[in-house]
């Protein structure tokens, strides 16, 4: 396995975290502007990314490449953890900002 395979979980987790942060920023500004188009498009792209990670995991299992399947599994886990963590942090931040401004 190359060096990219060893870095795949961190790369996927960071990319999902960055994408989720940007999408939450778009959703927050869209909520303020009463427009939600970016919100759905962005989350559709995030769903496609997670689907490709899941399909890569299943393909590695089918091809009996256990080392690659393990890396794909952990990349899925890190991606989902990053998605949840950024959502929780964003929710806490916006709730705090709404409380301050009220």
Image (cartoon, rainbow, N blue to C red):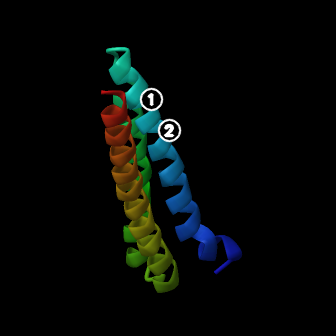
Residue 22 marker: 2
Name the outermost residue toward the right. 3
Spatial distance from mark 2 to mark 1, Cα to Cα? Answer: 6 Å
**Does residue 19 sit above or below 4 in this rendering?**
above
Do the residues under discs 2 and 1 have CB atoms within 8 angstroms? Answer: yes
Confirm whether residue 19 shows in the render.
yes
Q: Who's the residue at 42% across and 52% down the image? A: 86
**Does residue 1 sit above or below 14 in this rendering?**
below
Residue 4 marker: none
Residue beneath disc 1: 26
Mark 2 element type: helix
Q: Nearer the viewer, residue 97 or 68?
A: 97
Q: Nearer the viewer, residue 16 or 62?
A: 16
**Which x, y percent locates residue 57?**
41, 69
Query: Horizontally, is 75 left or right of 102 in the view?
Result: right
Q: Nearer the viewer, residue 33 or 52?
A: 33
Mark 1 element type: helix
Query: Horizontally, is 77 left or right of 71 in the view?
Result: left
Q: Who's the residue at 38% across and 22% down the image? A: 30
**Which x, y percent locates residue 53?**
43, 60
Q: Nearer the viewer, residue 15 or 28?
A: 28
**Which x, y percent locates residue 37?**
36, 21
**Which x, y percent locates residue 84?**
35, 57
**Does residue 82 sit above or below 32 in this rendering?**
below
């Amino acid at each position: 396995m190359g060096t990219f395979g060893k870095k795949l979980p961190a790369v996927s987790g960071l990319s999902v975290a960055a994408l989720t942060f940007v999408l939450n920023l778009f959703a927050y500004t869209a909520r303020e502007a009463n427009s939600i188009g970016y919100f759905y498009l962005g989350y559709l792209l995030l769903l496609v990314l997670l689907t490709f990670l899941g399909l890569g995991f299943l393909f590695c299992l089918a091809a009996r490449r256990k080392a690659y399947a393990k890396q794909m599994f952990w990349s899925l886990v890190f991606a989902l953890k990053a998605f949840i963590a950024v959502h929780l942090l964003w929710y806490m931040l916006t709730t705090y900002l709404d409380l301050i401004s009220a």
